[in-house]
Image: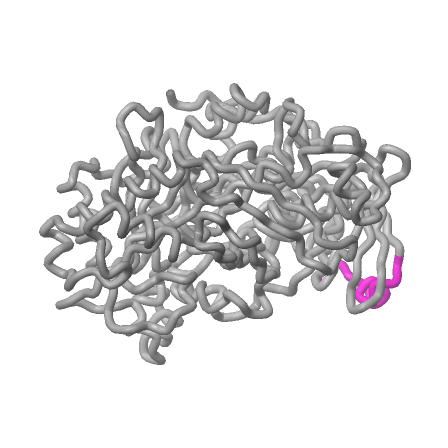
Amino acid sequence: MAGETASEQAGLKQDVFNYVIVGAGSAGCVLAARLTEDPSVSVLLLEAGSEDDADEIKIPAAFPTLFKTKWDWNYETTPQKHLDERRAYWPRMKALGGCSSMNAMIYIRGNRADYDGWRDEHGAQGWGYQDVLPYFIRAEHNSSLSGPYHGTDGPQRVEDRRYTHELTDAWVAAAVSAGIKPTEDFNGAEQEGAGRYQVTCHKGRRWSTADGYLRPALGRPNLTVRTGAHTTRVLLRGDRAVGVRYLRGGVEGTAHASVEVILSGGAVNSPQLLMLSGIGPADHLRELGIDVAVNLAGVGENLQDHPVTPMLWDTRNTTDLADFSTPLRLAQWQATGRGPLASNVGEGGAFFASRDGLPAPDLQILVAASGFYDNGLREPVGKRFTAGVTLVDVASRGRLRLRSANPLWRPEMDPAYFEEQVDMDAMLAGCRRAVDIAGESAIAAFLDGPSLPIRMDSDGDLVDHIRAWCQTLYHPVGTCAMGDGEDSVVDSQLRVHGVEGLRVVDASVMPTVPRGNTNAPTIMIAERAADLILGKTVIDTPAPR
């Protein structure tokens, strides 16, 4: 990796940098690239995982093959009361690019109401929709959309997918027939509608933040990247963060930050590291024998995630994406970036409200021309079609806690799925809507009856199915929430309360989970954070209203 000496690779040297960034994921790669645009700024980027050098990372349709492998942190939640006491599996990428190297590549920014809510309800000043839209635009390099809502020269490639299965378009037509308006842009003036999703790909290949931001910066002498470096503690001198300790190849290393330490480990790793460092709920830390440096009750609280319920039908007179995992199709994708392996699986869908009177959609459906359930880990059984009904406006709140003071132990995560009845009511309404859409002629011509659940007739059938099969959509946020309330962890500048020289920049700072896939919002947060950290004037380009 660029900029490393033999002694640094051995993890023996104690180094001093202006900024030490923990986590080379969706946010960390952005920060490292933006901060080192100033040649006078030195940055160390630490990543617990390895380089993102596997072919299956680049193949869009192959993303489920990364689950439960060396690339995966392989987390599980506590048993979930409202999911038949099941533990939910939470895949998180352990490599350069983080979850932008593992996700389904769906480019969704969220809803205007999300960001205005951050500002108005949580005290996150400067994070309203008008404030953040310019950063979405700065990040984006969209190959087909432009105008007031889109960027065309940013580092993050976004494109229309190079392959779309006929079942996706049939379902979109059915959704429109069922009363959902069509849309060609979920990130434009309005989010609500049914259509194809754009993807974070370039010429049919995944384009992560490691591709767009980090690699172009690797030749800079002021950037050092260390993979295989598991950060175990933030070092404090009084009430100031001065560096970190990390393990690399079984050897402990120390890196000092003359300006700031920045945590970008995500909604699991960042609160875990804060608590391991003595920053968190005092009683919980004392229970584990951790000396309390800062009593910050909100660390690990406010955990939110998007639950998704897979609804499956058998199909007829069509194909299944699973049929195309062949050497011939691989050769096609390698040569052209086209064909079924360029599918991101969740090719299209819709945003809509579960009931009248809501200010914004609270439901999303993602459709796949295959049987995608149990995180795509089941072997294909026949040809199937999936509608993943997703709750995107989540009322339930969970928490994350340490299980041990040992930094190598996984923390305990309880997203409290459906703890609030309003969440179950909305999910049930979404499943009913999915059943109704499946009855429309455009898609019904391809469906040969329900397969999971076998019965979709009554609310009881659907609730039983939700409890048995609902899973994560891989969007945990909120455990280091931004704002000015008692349970907030960072302020609007993303500075940790009560600690100088320490920020958190990742999905954990989101006060509420946005209505949609969370990768684009995480990139936006890092883009804006870079300006805040460097003291630049934040972008105030007038946004469309």
Q: Residue at x 28, y 40 (%)?
A: 429
Q: Give residue 400's quadrant in the image.
A: top right
- Locate residue 496, reporting x and y percent: 72, 33
| Magenta part of the chain | 1-13
| 168 is higher (above) or lower (below) than 390 | below
Q: Give residue 12's quadrant in the image.
A: bottom right
Relative horizontal placement of residue 83, taking residue 478 as reference (left or right): left
| 102 is higher (above) or lower (below) than 497 | below
Q: Residue at x 24, y 69 (%)?
A: 383
- Locate residue 96, reporting x and y percent: 61, 58
Relative horizontal placement of residue 203, taking residue 440 as reference (left or right): right
Along the line of sight, which residue is nearer the eye, 452 or 337? 452
**Magenta residue check for 163:** no
Along the line of sight, which residue is nearer the eye, 437 or 210? 437
Along the line of sight, which residue is nearer the eye, 300 or 257? 300
**Dominant secondary structure of the residues highlighted in magenta in the image:** loop
| 173 is higher (above) or lower (below) than 47 | above
- Locate residue 457, reporting x and y percent: 19, 51
Q: Quadrant of the C terminus?
A: top left
Q: Is residue 150 visible?
A: no
- Locate residue 456, reporting x and y percent: 22, 53
